Every structure is written in C-alpha cells, then in structure tokens.
Image (tube, helix red, strand yellow):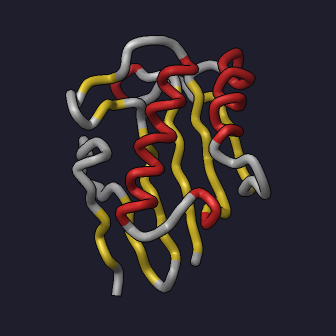
Amino acid sequence: MKKVIFTEKAPKAIGPYSQAIEKNGQLFVSGQVPVDPATSKVVEGGITEQTEQVMKNIESILQSAGYSFSDVVKSTCLLSDMSNFAAMNEVYGKYYPENPPARAAFAVKELPLGVLVEIETLAIK
C-alpha cells in the first residue's frame, strides 16, 4: 500500500500530485521548487539561494517520512540554464558530503513559477 507524505515544512503541491509517496521502503519525492513554505513564495535571489531552498524542502519531506539524505539513492536536477550548473552543484554537494547519490542534471526550456531549479529525489531504506 502506498503512503502519501505531507509536511507543512515544505511547500504544498501546486497541482494534482503529492509531496512524496512511500511504498515498500522507497520514498519518491516530487520535484521541489524554491518556494518558502512559510510564505508560499519563490525565494529571492539567484541559483544559490534557490538551490538552498529546494534542498531544505527536500530535507523537510525526507525527515517527515523518517528518511535522511543518507538514504537518497537518486536525484534529478532540472535547471532553466546549464550556466547555473556549477553554482547549483556547489550547494547540492553540501548535502551529500559522503557517498552522494546517482544523479542526472538537465537544462529544460521552462520550470514552474519561472524558477531556476527543480530537484526530485528517490530514497530507499
């Protein structure tokens, strides 16, 4: 049986999806954008600030489901522009100081709310 994961410490879904779904010891975290859950607004600043907020949102969802960054096995990073890759990568790397997960990073034409970055995550216990 799948379990829907929801926490007030991450942005509410802006469409017909859940923050995360857990099934059989696997946690599928929907793509997170840099929305501050306290204000429901995109954080101010550039790629560094936006990536930091995305990672905080992911952390809140992981924790609410009883997982941590050490349980993450795969991430997909979507960028509005590959010129932001190095700065995104620097912030992202702080959350995975050892044994980082597998990852893909893509530039896409456009992201929701006009943000610079969106990251989805898969964690397994």
Q: Toward which corner of the image does residue 68 lie, by quadrant?
A: bottom right
Whether residue 66 sits left or right of residue 46 in the image: it is left
User: In the image, what residue occupies the spot 62% across and 61% down?
Assistant: 72
Whether residue 57 sits left or right of residue 119 in the image: it is left
Instruction: Please say if 28 is above or below 100.
Output: below
- Image coords of residue 107 (percent x, y): 64, 28
User: In the image, what residue occupies the spot 45% across and 57% down?
Assistant: 29
Instruction: Please say if 21 is above or below 82.
Output: below
Q: Report the label total.
A: 0
Whether residue 63 sits left or right of residue 121 in the image: it is left
Quarter of the image with the N terminus in it: bottom left
Whether residue 98 sits left or right of residue 13 in the image: it is right
Q: Which residue is at the far top?
A: 45
Quarter of the image with the C terminus in it: bottom right
- Image coords of residue 35 (percent x, y): 33, 31
User: In the image, what residue occupies the spot 74% across and 23% down?
Assistant: 86
Q: Which residue is at the far right?
A: 99
